[in-house]
Amino acid sequence: MKLATTARLSLALGQPRGVAFGLMRLRAIQRQVLARAGHEAGKGNVVTAAALILLWLAGC
């Protein structure tokens, strides 16, 4: 979301289209790398699981 907003802002400020497309390519690459690594933090699953484990440990 931040990169898409940054890309739109760069176009609005008169930057070349290549800058905006480069930012969008960075986002696509980031998604591919995270997906290959099996990363789920973007969905909030890892953060939620960590918080639940901490609460469970605090209750023991």
Image: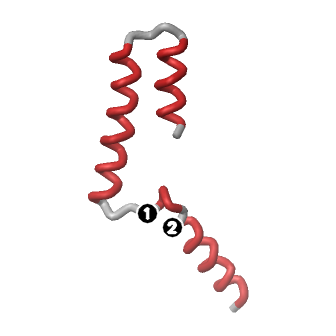
Q: Is residue 17 left or right of residue 57?
A: left
Q: Amino acid at mark 1?
A: Glu
Quadrant in which the C terminus appears: bottom right
Q: Residue at x 35, y 54 (%)?
A: 34
Is label 1 in contact with label 2 (beta carbons under 8 Å)? yes
Report which quarter residue 29 is drawn in.
top left
Q: Return the residue nearer the eye: 48 or 9.
A: 9
Q: Residue at x 30, y 60 (%)?
A: 37
Per the image, label 2 sits on a secondary structure element best described as helix
Residue 27 lies, with reference to residue 48, above or below; the image says above
Q: Position of residue 47 (x, y in %)?
A: 56, 65
Q: Is residue 23 left or right of residue 8?
A: left
Q: Amino acid at mark 2?
A: Val
Per the image, label 1 sits on a secondary structure element best described as loop
Report which quarter residue 15 is drawn in.
top left
Q: Is residue 47 left or right of residue 15?
A: right
Q: Is residue 9 left or right of residue 37?
A: right
Task: Identify the residue position indicated by label 2 in the image.
Answer: 46
Identify the mark at residue 40; answer none if there is no mark: 1
Q: Farthest right residue?
A: 59
